[in-house]
Amino acid sequence: MTVLTIEELAAALQPGQAVAGLDLGTKTIGLAMSDLGRRLASPRPVIKRVKFTKDAEVLLAFAQKEKVFAFIIGLPVNMDGSSGPRVQATRAFVRAMAEKTDIPFIFWDERLSTVAAERALLEMDVSRAKRAERIDSAAASFILQGALDRLLSLTASES
């Protein structure tokens, strides 16, 4: 498994290859999938975290089922751009995944993704209980959509 930049991913992707978005939390992993045209991110059910080995198995089963080419994983950078313990935990998760898969990971700045997801769910009048259930996958969708928009602009500038 490799860690790629978004530019390296844009160069490696072939038409019809989908990418997944991940919002790594302490209790859940939010999931989102792109369509095959890589224009739209859609939330998927969260993975309830148990321990790394089990989490990795569930994530890789999802990747196989959905034919994931790459994972866009949110990097929870502090608002001032510094790295805190959550950034270290995310990087450690990706390093541990390197031993289990060849699927590349791309770090994506996720600042305000949870805030944006919460706002969107509030605007849709989703109840508090349902918001708590859906927030991580909604955040994963925001992370993935940002990366998809960047991929689109990179491929448009090549043509």
Image (tube, helix red, strand yellow):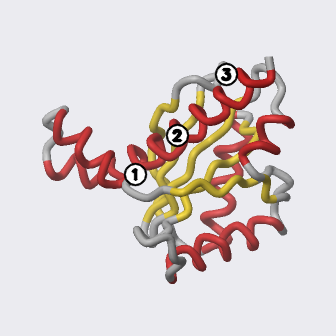
Q: Earlier in the sequence, mark 2 or mark 3?
A: 3
Question: Is disc 3 in contact with disc 1, using a CB cutoff of under 8 Å?
Answer: no
Question: Is disc 2 in contact with disc 3, using a CB cutoff of under 8 Å?
Answer: no
Q: Is residue 96 above or below residue 23?
A: below
In space, the residues marked 2 and 3 are separated at their CA atoms by 16 Å
Question: Is disc 1 in contact with disc 2, using a CB cutoff of under 8 Å?
Answer: yes
Residue 146 is marked as 2
Say what amino acid the circle numbered 2 marks. Gly
Place residue 98 in its image quadrant.
bottom right
Q: Is residue 45 above or below residue 34?
A: below
Q: Is residue 142 above or below residue 35?
A: below
In space, the residues marked 3 and 1 are separated at their CA atoms by 23 Å
Position of residue 147 measured from the top left corner of the image (x, y, whole percent): 59, 40
Place residue 1 in its image quadrant.
bottom right
Q: Earlier in the sequence, mark 1 or mark 2?
A: 1
Position of residue 119 measured from the top left corner of the image (x, y, whole percent): 23, 44
Which residue occupies the foreground of this view, 47 or 147?
A: 147
Around disc 3, counting alpha carbons within 10 Å, would you say few (fewer than 14), some (14 to 19), or many (20 or more)?
A: few
- Read off the residue under disc 3: 36
- Read off the residue under disc 1: 113
Position of residue 115 measured from the top left corner of the image (x, y, whole percent): 30, 53
